[in-house]
Each structure stands twice: as structure tokens, then as C-alpha cells.
Image: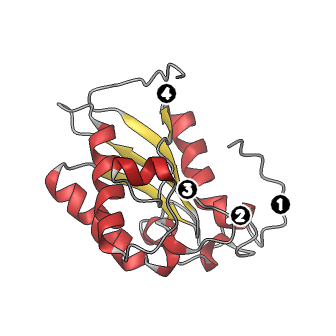
């Protein structure tokens, strides 16, 4: 088994990507967006964190969050979100024999991508990446047209202009 190295920083700010197990043609996250939002609210009540940026696409999501100053356990928060969401939808997905033996659902990939934000430039780059993602995946031509994103709140807070990233024809280079 690979030796995954996670950087645990008390009060850290992190970028995450969480993927559905079956990504191709799967719209589960946007189809059940209210249940996903409920799962995030539920996890935040139990173990607070600050949401800086979040985007939900049909088969994966990205977020930038900060942990409390006395806490480094991001894994618990992600596990609670995934667990609550999984328990809230009907148990109809295909599951491998291994998942069935472990009593696991076949909704989420087990692992996730995590990146500790290093500085303001890194923070800004990851926030931009979060919000440009629906355009990058061809879901909309303009960032403002994607409804499942904190972009709209950040426009209201004057962090981004409403026409940020224009009509989607600019060449924005954001590595995944």
C-alpha cells in the first residue's frame, strides 16, 4: 500500500478534491445538491471549519477550507461529509465484493486530494481554480452561470467581479 503523506497543520487552510467512485456520466452530486449541502452543514456544526471556496460538479467537488486554530483533523470533517451524504441517498449503486464485505457504499473514492495552502498567492490560485472548474469542464461558458459554487457569495462580498474569467474563452492555466 502506498505511503500517503498528509500534512497536518493546526488551524491550516487546505484545498481538497473529492471524487465520486463512478465519475463517467454520474451527476449524483448536483442531482442531490440539497442533501450534500445538508451533509456539509451537519459536519460543520459537529466540527467547525471555515469555507473560503467550494464548487460542486456532477461527479466531484473542490473546496478551500480553514480549520480552527486548535484543530488539524480535516480527515474527520471530510469523512463526516461523505458519510452523511452517502447515508442520505438510496442504496442503489453497484458495489464491488470488497466494498460489500466491508459494508461500504459505492459512492465515493476512498482517497481524496489534499493540499496545504502555503501563502496568499497559493490561496488565490486555488480559489481561482475552484471557481473556474465548471468552465474548465465545459459545463458552462461563464463562471457566473454555474449555480453550485461559492462564486456567487464572493461576488456579493466584492472578492470577484461578476464577469470574472469573462466568457470562458480566455486561456487560464490552472493545474489540477
Residue at 43%, 69% (x, y): give it. 153
Q: How is the image coloured?
A: secondary structure
**Left or right of 23 in this view: 46:** left
Q: Which residue is mark 4?
A: 118
| Label 2, label 3: how far apart the Cα atoms are | 30 Å
In the drawing, what numbered circle is on residue 134? none
Q: Is residue 148 visible?
A: no
Q: Earlier in the sequence, mark 4 or mark 2?
A: 4
Secondary-structure class at tag 3 = loop
Provide residue 91's location: percent of width, then percent of height.
38, 72
39 vs 124, nearest the viewer: 39
* CB-based contact (under 8 Å), mark 4 and mark 2: no
Q: Is residue 116 visible?
A: yes
Residue at 40%, 59% (x, y): give it. 105
* CB-based contact (under 8 Å), mark 2 and mark 1: yes
Q: Which residue is mark 1?
A: 170
Provide residue 17's location: percent of width, then percent of height.
53, 48
Q: Residues within 10 Å of mark 4 (few under 14, many from 20)?
A: few
| Label 3, label 1: how far apart the Cα atoms are | 31 Å
Secondary-structure class at tag 1 = loop
In the drawing, what numbered circle is on residue 21? 3
Secondary-structure class at tag 2 = loop
| Label 4, label 3: how far apart the Cα atoms are | 29 Å
Q: Nearer the viewer, mark 2 or mark 3?
A: 3
Q: Earlier in the sequence, mark 4 or mark 3?
A: 3
| Label 4, label 2: how far apart the Cα atoms are | 24 Å
Question: Is 69 drawn above or below residue 66 in the view shown?
Answer: above
Q: Which residue is mark 2?
A: 165
Q: Earlier in the sequence, mark 2 or mark 1?
A: 2
Amino acid at each position: 500500500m502506498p505511503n500517503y503523506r498528509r500534512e497536518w497543520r493546526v488551524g491550516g487552510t487546505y484545498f481538497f478534491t473529492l471524487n465520486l467512485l463512478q465519475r463517467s456520466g454520474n451527476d449524483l452530486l448536483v442531482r442531490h445538491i440539497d442533501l450534500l449541502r445538508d451533509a456539509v452543514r451537519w459536519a460543520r456544526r459537529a466540527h467547525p471549519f471555515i469555507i473560503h471556496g467550494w464548487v460542486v460538479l456532477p461527479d466531484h467537488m473542490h473546496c478551500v477550507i480553514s480549520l480552527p486554530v486548535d484543530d488539524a483533523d480535516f480527515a474527520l470533517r471530510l469523512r463526516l461529509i461523505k458519510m452523511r451524504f452517502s447515508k442520505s441517498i438510496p442504496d442503489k449503486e453497484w458495489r464491488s465484493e470488497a466494498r460489500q464485505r466491508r459494508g461500504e457504499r459505492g459512492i465515493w473514492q476512498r482517497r481524496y486530494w489534499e493540499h496545504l495552502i502555503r501563502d496568499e498567492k497559493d490561496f488565490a490560485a486555488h480559489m481561482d481554480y475552484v471557481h473556474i472548474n465548471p468552465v474548465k469542464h465545459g459545463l458552462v461558458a461563464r463562471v457566473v452561470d454555474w449555480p453550485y459554487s461559492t462564486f456567487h457569495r464572493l461576488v456579493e462580498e466584492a472578492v470577484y467581479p461578476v464577469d470574472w474569467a469573462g466568457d470562458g474563452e480566455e486561456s487560464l492555466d490552472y493545474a489540477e
